[in-house]
Amino acid sequence: MKMNYFVFGTNDKEKAVIFYNELFDGCGLNKIHDQGRMTLWGNDEFMFAIAEPFDEHPASNGNGTMLGLHVDSMNEVNRLHKKALELGGVSEGEPRIRSNMHSAYMRDLDNNKVCFYTSNT
């Protein structure tokens, strides 16, 4: 079994799409669906989406919920973390070695938590 996709809820789809379009630029995740309440980026291995909740209640983030994105290098961890902050994200942990992996944490515009990490230390 492997994870196929991950979805974050959003309360401002337009701003969230801009954030993730810029963040994923050059990362190998391409926008493959942008219709109605959902926008989806993907490649051959993984898909990520933002969506306005189907039940029409406000989106909220889960306490303890986090998406981990494995990238190819320490430089890419650093670059993505810096870029996320430039796009309006908030740091939840600067890039450094944790548990034998180089990782960095951020929250997006809807306060969802994302970790960028690599085992190439």
Image (cartoon, rainbow, N blue to C red):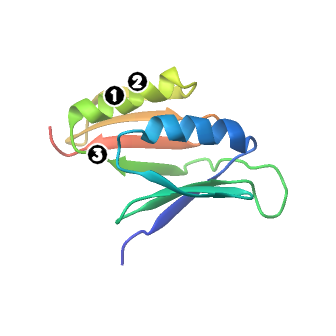
User: Looking at this rendering, what residue extends furthest in the right direction?
Assistant: 56
Find residue 99 and report its image quarter: top left
Q: Determine if residue 86 is in view.
A: yes
- Rendering quarter of residue 51: bottom right
Which residue, given by chain and number where applicable, does mark 1 sit on?
Answer: 79
Residue at image coords 75%, 58%: 53
Dots 2 and 1: beta carbons under 8 Å? yes
Q: Quadrant of residue 89?
A: top right
Element under label 2?
Answer: helix
Q: Earlier in the sequence, mark 3 or mark 1?
A: 3
Kind of residue sitting beneath label 1: Arg
C-alpha separation, residue under disc 3 versus residue under disc 1: 11 Å
Left or right: 114 as drawn, with respect to 111: left
User: What whole-number distance in Å separates the C-alpha atoms at marks 3 and 2?
Assistant: 14 Å
Front-lying residue, 40 or 61: 40
Residue furthest left as drawn: 121
Q: Residue furthest bottom?
A: 1
| In the displayed structure image, the side of residue 9 where residue 119 appears, left or right | left
The percent coordinates of residue 17 (x first, y second) are: 61, 42
Up-down relation of residue 102 to residue 57 (above or below): above
The mark that comes first in sequence, 3 or 2, is 3
Residue 68, given in percent of the width and then of the height, sits at 40, 50
Give the residue number, with chain letter if any, for mark 3: 71
Q: Secondary structure at mark 3?
A: loop
Residue type indicated by callout 2: Lys
For residue 82, which numbered disc appears in the image? Answer: 2
